[in-house]
Image (cartoon, grey):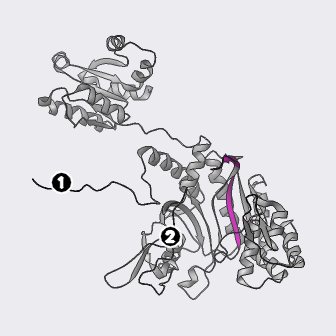
Amino acid sequence: MTEKTKLINPRLPRGFEDRTPGDIAAVGQMIETIRKVYERYGFDPVETPLFEFTETLGKFLPDTDRPNAGVFSLQDDDEQWMSLRYDLTAPLARYFAENFETLPKPYRSYRQGYVFRNEKPGPGRFRQFMQFDADTVGAPGAEADAEMCMMMADVMDALGLGGKYIVRVNNRKVLDGVLEAAGVTSDEQKLAVLRAVDKLDKFGPEGVKLLLGAGRKDESGDFTKGAGLTDAQAAVVLDYVAGKPPADNDGVAELNTMQALFDAAGYGADKIKIDPSVVRGLEYYTGPVFEIELTFKVQNEKGQDVVFGSVGGGGRYDGLVSRFRREPVPATGFSIGVSRLANALKLTGNLGSKEPVGPVVVLVMDKDQTARYQAMVSELRKAGIRAEMFLGSTKNFGKQVSYADKRNAPAVVIEGSQEREQGILQIKDLVAGKEAAQAITDNAEWKAARPGQFEVKREDLVSAIQKLLSEQ
């Protein structure tokens, strides 16, 4: 007796997910809407590969046998380390530098695709997720940053989120000026101050004040260590949080330029707002920073009402391309978190969550007549109609119809020996049948009524299906 082969347990690695036809169709529709806005602004698509050399991504080999600081990596046969991209911006910087001589400047592009993080997964935190970015490389002025903010607002409007979002804008130069005025010099303390400022929306001015000092204890008793500023130092930061920016600062001038452009283009504070609490990419951004925040309430895992929060953001990153070239190359851009935005659209009813319509299924009533059924399928396909011939076991009529139901088919086509002799077909409208079924409780009545079923001449198959689909 032979030993049974051990079966492999079908399971996904943590932090990854499968996507169904409904998910793909809904997100595809959302992406198409975003793409149209990007292209209306004059941005063109570019696609970079999933893998880049590890040093290109800005992650460098540690002293261990593989680079695993946040990226998935492997060693090529020439001993070069490659990593799956963890964002879409670093590959763009490499692409621009590599094609510097041939690309127009400024270079305006958008990219959409999966990125990968070698991090511990958790609720809503995946190791593979999709981003949709737009960037302008080679434009040094605040006008390019302002355009990004306006495009973000237009994307939200196009997705049906008007009145439910705000694009919040700040400038890293302003933040750096505040830190300098407060006499904060150590990197550790700078980070703690900026994290405190970032909590303004969540904890208010009093909470920020505690985080700037010794620290803050929350309702559960958990204590967060503060930045350790003196009262005088904290007062400078709190003045800034209250809306008093440092004087004679380049960042303030850039924000004023951006505000003038927002006003001229008709983007009021209900869409785009200068906000001193915006802190992004503490070591990454060099000028204006911005994020899209959705302002409607949702319930968190504790059942509490909270604002949905950020679905994307970006800013000016003038130092990234200069890793590849000697001359300075200014750049600005933003990234949308596709999965998170799709979840928001689902909550607001702006994401099509219905299963996509399946193909018309031609049933196989007589196995020796498959050529006839295939001819019907071909006629439908040539007319641009999704169609297929049932390819499973044909012994059970009910199972064939059940299959069509699971495929979300709009109709099935039936030709048995009787229909063939008369030169007719039976078409079963599965959509109408489901609606009628709700009103019929008796099985015999169901069989007699045959709801949604009608007959047509064989030569009228295509026109009958076209009419049926248009009515559905």
The image position of residue 387, as x and y in percent, is 30, 36
**Can residue 295 be seen?**
no
Residue extent of the magenta highlight: 277-305
Q: Who is closer to the viewer here, 373 or 194? A: 194
The C terminus lies in quadrant:
top left
The image position of residue 353, as x and y in percent, is 51, 41
Q: Which residue is mark 2?
A: 86
The image position of residue 326, as x and y in percent, is 57, 89
Q: Residue at x 41, y 26 (%)?
A: 431
Amino acid type, callout 1: Lys
Q: CA distance from mark 2 to mark 1?
A: 42 Å
- Residue 230, disc: none
- Residue 4, disc: 1
Q: Residue at x 81, y 77 (%)?
A: 178
Q: Residue at x 57, y 54 (%)?
A: 340
Magenta stretch containing residue 85, yes or no?
A: no
Query: In terms of image quadrants, where is residue 325?
Result: bottom right
